[in-house]
Amino acid sequence: MKSFIAVDEKSHFPIQNLPYGIFSKQDDPHLRVGVAIGDYVLDLSILEDKGFYKDALDQNTRVFNRSTLNPLMELGRDVWRKVRKITQQLLSADESQLRDNMELRKQVLVPMESVKLHLPVTIGDYTDFYASKEHAMNVGTMFRGKEHALMPNWVYLPVGYHGRASSVVLSGTRIRRPWGQIKLADHPPIFAPCRQLDFELEIGFIMGTGNKQGEPIPIAEAEEHLFGAVLLNDWSARDIQSWEYQPLGPFLGKNFATSISPWVIPLEALEHFRVQGPVQDPEPLEYLQQGQPGSFHIQLEVHLRSKAMNHAKPISATNYRYLYWSIAQQIAHHTIGGCNLNPGDLLASGTISGPEKETRGSMLELTWRGDEPIHINEEETREWLEDGDELILTGWCQGEGYRVGFGEVVGIIEPALAKDEVLRKKAVTENHK
């Protein structure tokens, strides 16, 4: 498949991808839905107004002149497939409707460099899983020793926790170092800025259509409810987390920020790269048994740039296919008790780590809890992320002469607020109440 728009073979956005996003123009702050194609954004709102999607959408339905993808996602997979087919046909090298209409092309093809991207979905709920066996083994070994690294339940069910949807932010948002309680050895806890700030390399899946409360989603139907995927960085304050997490799990160590990439990759774009995940032993219980390969061959990289560096340095390279629990298994387990998922809900994979040190997806693992600092240039090492550090996650599926990519998710660490400012803000809030 070829487009009449020239797309470099290393571009993340060929015609085989066509991810959805929300954008505005420099001269027009109005938000609308677009699709990435090469170095351009295709404005779907104009094409919709001109009737190009009449065979996919009801005449009274307008989903592209919106500030979020949720109205499109609510319509279901049959509509998503029709919209994608029409868009691919319009951009095809063999189709003249857009290719030969220079006036229309000028209206609907906006240079990527001239747009502002926005959070693509309204996220109602956010669940973060713990689906990588290598990651779970590494973390368990650090805290409990290798013999007791995995909790007894880990190989029987996808472990997860309820995250904070309100602090999910778009790539490029600067990340403020959080304050919290930190427990030092042989001392009572102190109130201080996080000293062990970390990233987590993840893929997030966005629900398109949900289920009614009390009606679980069978595993064979789970992927039919998924709209697409994003890159995700679940920022983590490890010292705050390690003190607070027992007995109920992550709280302040996780809820201050989660970054996602701006482009939502349709599940259809990943289908060509479907692969079998790791062998699951013991065999999952009946409701978690999946009939088809449930993973995807997505290459993932992490790059870090300090304030002293001109260019970011790769510090990790791994693959989504290492994940033990598939997204279909995660959905089936999430809903088996009757929990209802809704359009826009975000389900994250948890840290993606592989079997080798260079394939670990967090600083916690790369530096082995700070005991083995990594070199990021000739003069600097890192145990944890420092103020001013820029963290860049990227990922793609490699085809023959093309890539289906996620773009990037980027974050720069800002220093913590001064203590008197933190306490002053608290006092103002209390006085207001």
Image (cartoon, helix red, strand yellow):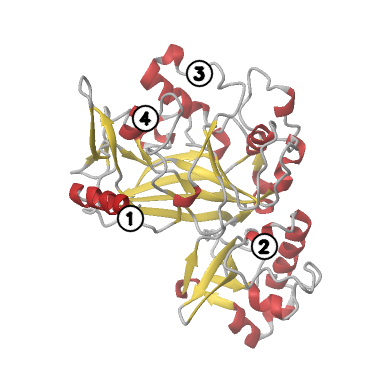
Residue 361 vs 369, above or below: the answer is below
For label 1, the residue is 432
Picture residue at 78% right of the left edge, 56% below the top? 78
Circle nearer the N terminus (3, 2): 2
Residue 143 sits in which quadrant?
A: top left
In screen coordinates, is 313 left or right of 334? Answer: left
Label 3: which secondary element: loop
In screen coordinates, is 34 left or right of 211? Answer: left
Residue 32 sits in which quadrant?
A: bottom right
C-alpha span from label 3 to label 4: 18 Å
Q: Amino acid at mark 3?
A: Met
For label 3, the residue is 151
Instruction: Identify the disc placed on residue 71.
Output: 2
Circle nearer the N terminus (1, 2): 2
| Tags 4 and 1 touching, CB below 8 Å | no
C-alpha span from label 4 to label 2: 38 Å
Callout 4 environment at 10 Å: few (<14), some (14 to 19), or many (20+)?
some
Image position, residue 42 (x, y; %): 60, 72
Picture residue at 44% right of the left edge, 43% below the top? 234
| Tags 4 and 2 touching, CB below 8 Å | no
> Which label lies toward us, 1 or 3?
1
C-alpha span from label 1 to label 3: 45 Å
For label 4, the residue is 244
Image position, residue 343 (x, y; %): 65, 52
Callout 3 environment at 10 Å: few (<14), some (14 to 19), or many (20+)?
few
> Which label lies toward us, 4 or 1?
1
Label 4: which secondary element: helix
Instruction: Identify the disc placed on residue 280.
Output: none
Q: Toward the viewer: 61 or 296?
A: 61
Image position, residue 197 (x, y; %): 31, 40
Query: Is any part of residue 199 visible from this angle?
Result: yes
| Tags 3 and 2 touching, CB below 8 Å | no
